[in-house]
Amino acid sequence: MNRLELRAVSKRFGETLANDAVSLTVAPGEIHAVLGENGAGKSTLMKIIYGAVQPDEGEIFWQGVPVTMANPATARRFGIGMVYQHFSLFETVSVLENIAVAMDGPFDLPALAVRVSDLGRRYGLEVDAHRLLHHLSVGERQRVEILRCLLQDPRLLILDEPTAVLTPQAARRLFEVLRTLAAGGCSILYISHKLDEIRELCDSATVLRAGRVVGSAQPRQASAAELARLMVGADVPTVARGRAAGAARPRLEVRDLSMPPQDPFGVTLRGVSLAVNPGEILGIAGVSGNGQSELLSVLCGEIPSAPECVLLNGEPVGHLGVAARRGRGLAFAPEERLGRGAVAGMTLEDNGLLTGHARGLVRGGLIRRRETARFARAIIDQFGVKCVGPAALAGSLSGGNLQKFVVGREVALAPGVLIVAQPTWGVDVAAAAYLRQRLIELSRSGAALLVVSEDLEELLQICDRIAVIHRGTLSAASPCAGTDVEQIGLLMAGSDAAAPFAA
Amino acid sequence: MLGVELEPRAAPLRFMRWGSPLLALALTLIASMPLLWTLGLDPLATWRIFFLEPLATLNGVSEWLLKASPLILIALGLTVGFRANVWNIGAEGMFTIGAICSGWLALHFGGAAPRWLLPAMMLAGILGGMAWAAIPAFLKTHANASEILVTLMLNYVAALLLAYLVNGPMQDPQGMNYPQTALFEPAAMLAPLAAGLRVNASIFITAAAVAAAWVLLERSFLGFQLRVGGSAPAAARYAGFRQPQLVWLSLLVSGATAGLAGMLEAAGPLGQLTPVISPGYGFTAIIVAFVGRLSPLGIVFGGLLMSLLYLGGEAVQMSLNVPSSLARSFQGLLLFFLLAADVLILYRIRLRRH
């Protein structure tokens, strides 16, 4: 008997058909991949299974019995757990309280704390249960989400891009967790764009395109290229990387930056030094929560430092604010797309103006509406942002589409120095390849790029040199060519952060 | 079972920005019917007295504009702050200080009647309101003190200051010890637009302020920065907008308009200072700002509507002998339905079968 079966499930949002007669079966203990581009309808389908969205048509069978998933609480009672791509956690309370609100039964925080730390140790998902959630990085938040599901001993676990923020080793540990769970009879629905992962982990795969099932595959037998072609409907562009231009005077430099964190649970930066030359991409690898957000805040100017700690084009700018640094050719695409990189309640046109205002969009203090609309339209067209146009609200876009817009906007500013955090987080394969290609092109045209990412494969694909951050210390950068993933993974886990890792 | 769901729209419904106040007004009328029946009143006749009778005469229209003008002026200034999440609820106090400062000039120079007197009084009103607003701005930017509490409490300080002045230093020597100042000389007052009416040139000043506010809020980059600062402070920091400056700007602009409104009231219908110079304009303007969807043109309609509710309330009290709380129930119902109808701008209602 199937654990879960969907028969011809459809869901319409206004004009868009998010799911069109989707059928799917998951056997007990099966690890089932759901593949698809952004906007293919994966997230909607998962929300239907989890009861967060009601289907317009179709039937859901749980253990062979037709059921209505009226809401997530019903789904949880059946034994379905879900880790969302956009986390559903409360910012102002602790990790433990976040876990407690999702649990049925009486509140027993001390007992729960013990279970959380046991489970965390067992699965390598350690996180301090008493920290407030808003101090946690994206990666740490995901650990909380996964822990929260595991505590409920699920029969079906849905994971939306769970490894996006893990080290290779941690991802492998997670796979062990998932395999153990599956061996114990728990079924797993696994959404990911990392085709290699799916091939390594999943027993079967359902591929969605534009809301429809376009095929299913045995991932272990299929090649990554075959899977990608099925998903995209065409061959996937590969990223071409020319040679970096020879080193000149660094465009962006950090000299021996040490700084205590602004928030009590942050990371202290210790003696961070780096230099990015024009025409090259420097990557910073590391598990989130190791000082990346602190370093980025200092680099972009939100937190001032001693003037000579940060240099732009050789000039000390550590004391200057964000606007002054942007005026000197710095651009920045942050990790938090909604609320920081873009304002949810504003249109894409206004969100283009947010950082594009210095590029002729404002004259005499007044906004030039025709130019702002054109600027937003150009970003939408060039980066293939799926939306109703410049008047679309940023909050109505899917995560990947908004990411394309935010990164696209900063690239469109033609900056001398571009800092990007998690450039392709949640973006589909084809769009990610395109974004990466644009980043490489920008660097080859003479800009200096600093890319902070937890996706090691991405960094190895686009960077010229790579450094690893661990507990606020940055390793020396080494050329990407010929680096060993295992070695970087060990550095990310903190084995010897001070030494360069490539001979 | 049939359920009701709210579904987010892909883009905000433009039509509902204007449709929702109209819908709210219609719902207010419907919801007030049982109330009126209970009071033994005919709803249609009551509404006619409430909404139409006050505007039937030229004098009625004059009073309508005269009351709407300060409400609109103050609401415009408050909106600048509300868009930036700066909650100034101290317009009542800034209004009072504006009236005091301009009143002092009127009493000192009214006799000599220099030509610069009225412009100087306006400037004094504006500066007075701004000075009063600078206190919460300083405390907010330097000590992170909540502007809501500081502005609210300063209302009482201003009211007591006025009471002290009209009972002491500024009291009319020939006033038989009444707590009021001498009447302003004609040179220190705004002349009525026509004989027998009270409405004066203040409505043109308000109209100019509407235009200025429209440019600032809807067309200028500064207005955009205020909006970003209000809806996503992290995005404002990310983009490099200077938060403290936006706080200062928000409070100073609202102080200026409230202070100017105070001057226009003192030099207009009042013609002197008394212990109570505002029928709650500073607070009602907050409602006006929200009824007007924090947009300058909407505020004009909001101000006219609230002014009409004042007049209508008085009219039904006089003609039908009903309690004054009826008018306030109307205001409350209207605001309640407006907030509810606003949901439809961003969401659509869907009925579905479970």
Image (tube, rainbow, N blue to C red):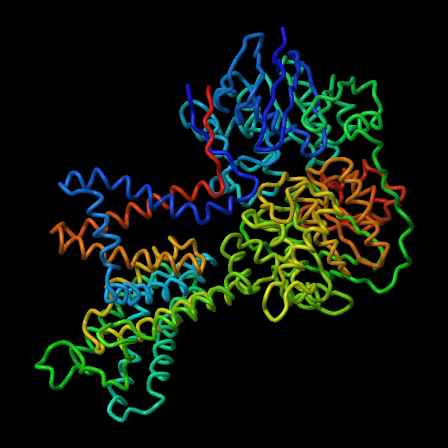
Residue A494: percent from left, percent from top: 72, 41
Can the viewer see residue A269?
no
Residue B256: percent from left, percent from top: 39, 72
Q: Residue furthest bottom?
A: B112
Residue B227: percent from left, percent from top: 51, 57
**Height in image: A41 above or below A503?**
above
Q: How many marks?
A: 0
Residue at coordinates 84% horizontally, 28% vertically from top-left?
A225
Looking at the rendering, in which quadrant would you find the N terminus of chain B?
top left
**Height in image: A31 above or below A442?**
above
In depth, the one of B196 and A379 nearer the eye is: B196
Quarter holding residue A492: top right
Taking the image as shown, residue B35 lies to the left or right of residue A95, namely left
In depth, the one of A117 and A482 nearer the eye is: A482
Quarter holding residue B308: bottom left
**Height in image: A223 above or below B335?**
above
**Height in image: A52 above or below B181?**
above
Q: Residue furthest left?
A: B176
Can the viewer see residue B59?
yes
Residue at coordinates 71% horizontally, 25% vertically from top-left?
A208
Taking the image as shown, residue A166 lies to the left or right of residue B177, namely right
Taking the image as shown, residue A231 lies to the left or right of residue B186, namely right
Residue A144: percent from left, percent from top: 57, 33
Residue at coordinates 62% horizontally, 32% vertically from top-left?
A16
In depth, the one of A8 and B235 nearer the eye is: A8
